[in-house]
Amino acid sequence: MSEDRDLDGFFSEARVSARDEAVSLDDRSFRDHLYPLDGDELAPWRGMSYEEFTAARQGNEFLQALLRDWDALYDEPFVGITSDGIVRSEVWADAASARSASGDPAVVAAAEHVLATLPDDLRERVRYDVDAPDWRGWSNPEFVFHRNGLRLEDLSDRQVAAILGLVEASLSSEGFAQVREAMALNGYLGELTGLPTIMNERSYWFSLFGTPSADEPWGWQLFGHHVAINFATVGGRDVIAPVFIGAEPALSDGARPPLFDDRERLALELAGSLTPEQRAEAVVFASVLDPAMPEGRLHPADERHVAGAFRDNRVVPSEGIAVSHLDAAQQALVRRIVADFLALLREPQREAMLARYDAHLDETWFSWYGATDGSEPVYFRIQSPVVIAELDNHAGVWLANRLPARFHVHTTLRLPNGNDYGRAWIAQWRSGIS
């Protein structure tokens, strides 16, 4: 099969075809990969609403197969991501009572303000039970799959401002800035492609789960193209996971702030510090399209990342180098990368999660695909019993690069062993034990 053959007009086989040669980066900008506005790649979609685009896209055979796979995963009972299929519930147990603290009243007030801006019919549509399976219906693509809650672009400015006010109240200032920048980059992509009715800063679905309360578990969800945030608060403890944040382009030549510069810089510093012996353990595959990858390791939509949409129950074996095999300076770099993935959490919530990460340092792994000198696109993952954090350079979807490049990035964050969506802590809260 030719690696240039399109799978569906958006995804080519090049993104999942093994290559003996390295995938090298060059100095070309994302602008060198813009499709012509009047070309076959973009012109057919111009002027479509998101629903019209979705209807047109879902007639594609490749996409139909992908959505069937997603439906099957969605229908599975929630277990949580594990390394071996066995959930270790003890990693989420706390010394204090699961009912020992109250949530932030300012966040509760922001959620109540959202509800106050909505008429009865929209208020009914936005709300779900805290245990509703709809938590798991989020996805990344710009076409619509699950229609959870309300679409921001269908709401008034006042209603959108209230929703974004809740998001801001729930996240750290730097975390909120990152989410808003990812949303802005989606709007920027809509401008670059001339498709603002399909991709814009409001191409996102918002839902409330449970009743906003300082005492009982509840949360919210915001998801759409390149942004998916799941926030739950339980007994004074916040969970922000699963998280999916990406951008195409993530590096926009000064037009927008770069999205993951610090994270990638730290990761390359860590990879570059590896001794030959450490590198032999940490580098799992020599290239992001290494022929040594087993069948199924590359996915035409997810490429290398393993913890994206509908992967709530995936078994992800640890790989790479045990972080305990790194020196103190290298371990500190790993921790800084994890802290960057956890940046959406407010303090002291972030430090509490980092303390939990520290407690499992002896069970933490770092894996790397590709060259360690910054000359190639990369994938890396940090995995412990309480955190899975990964970053993957992707091929183009709305840009023409058929091979992975630094300007299309996907990142994911999961809390394995059952605490995505705050599930483990909600179960503790209900039982009243820790």
Image (cartoon, helix red, strand yellow):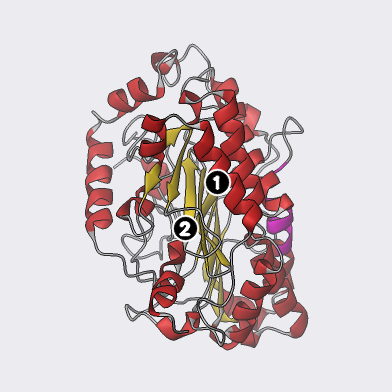
Which mark is on residue 111? 1
SS under mark 1: helix
Is residue 182 positioned above or below 288 on the image? Answer: above
Magenta segment boundaries in residue numbering: 258-266
Percent x, y of residue 2: 33, 39
The amino acid sitting under disc 1 is: Ala
Query: Hey, which quadrant is residue 181 in on the image?
Result: top right
Q: Is residue 122 left or right of residue 227?
A: left
**Callout 2 touching callout 1 (CB < 8 Å):** yes
Is residue 140 positioned above or below 291 on the image? Answer: above
Q: Residue at x 39, y 15 (%)?
A: 44
Query: Hey, which quadrant is residue 190 in on the image?
Result: top right
Where is mark 2, residue-wise? Answer: 218
Could one spot residue 406 in this view of the protein? no
SS under mark 2: strand
Does the stretch in magenta take in 124? no
Q: Earlier in the sequence, mark 2 or mark 1?
A: 1
Q: Badge 1 local density, few (<14 within 10 Å), some, or many (20+)? A: many
